[in-house]
Image: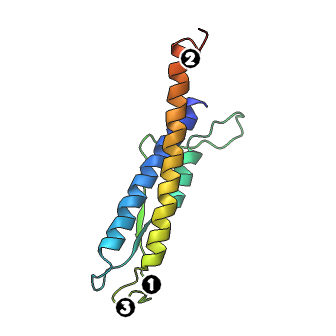
Amino acid sequence: MQSSGIKSLEKFIDYCSTKNKVISKNIANIGTENYKRQDVDFKSILSENMGQMRATNPKHLRLNQNSKPKFEISKDNSLDNVSGINNVDIDREMSELAANSIQFRFASRKIGDYYRGLQNVIKGGGKF
């Protein structure tokens, strides 16, 4: 895996961390009147990764390369009164939390594998 792949995985872990905080906030406020459910915008992740693309032809579009990912947190202003108090659906939040945890574990495992591989190469690659 190239270092740009590791950078993308690191940004994805940042996204998962931010998403986990937003989901936790939604769950914590399930009993709060007039609270509006929040979510993290995935388009910002996509545009961030688009900045990692390399132009191999002068006719390709130039993209900005930002080093710090910024995730846009949006409010769900729907008037659905799912919980009876606000628009937070506990089943939806719990399923998103489970999916986010699996994605986080996958990305962290891939990063760990990359660095273990590097460490193995530095130590001699198991030639002994």
Q: Amino acid at mark 2?
A: Val
Quadrant where the C terminus lies?
top right
Quadrant where the N terminus lies?
top right
User: Does residue 41 appear in the picture of this structure?
Assistant: no
Q: Position of residue 97 (x, y in %)?
A: 45, 64
Residue in the picture at 52% in, 61% down: 99
Q: Amino acid at mark 3?
A: Gly
Q: Quadrant of residue 61?
A: top right
Mark 3–mark 2 distance (CA, rounded to whole Å): 57 Å
Residue in the picture at 28% in, 86% down: 33
N-term mark: 3 or 1:
1
N-term mark: 2 or 1:
1
Residue linked to disc 3: 84
In-front residue for pair 52/94: 94
In-front residue for pair 47/40: 40
Q: Position of residue 52 (x, y in %)?
A: 57, 40
Residue in the picture at 43% in, 56% down: 71
**Element type at mark 2:** helix
Query: How many neighbours does mark 1 have within 10 angstroms: few (below 14), some (14-19), or many (20 or more)?
Result: few
Q: Position of residue 50 (x, y in %)?
A: 59, 47
**Element type at mark 1:** loop
Residue linked to disc 1: 78
Which color scheme is applied?
Answer: rainbow
- Horizontally, is 58 left or right of 46 in the view? right
Residue 121 numbered mark, or none? 2
**Element type at mark 3:** loop
Q: Amino acid at mark 1?
A: Ser
N-term mark: 3 or 2:
3
- Horizontally, is 4 left or right of 16 in the view? right
Mark 3–mark 1 distance (CA, rounded to whole Å): 14 Å
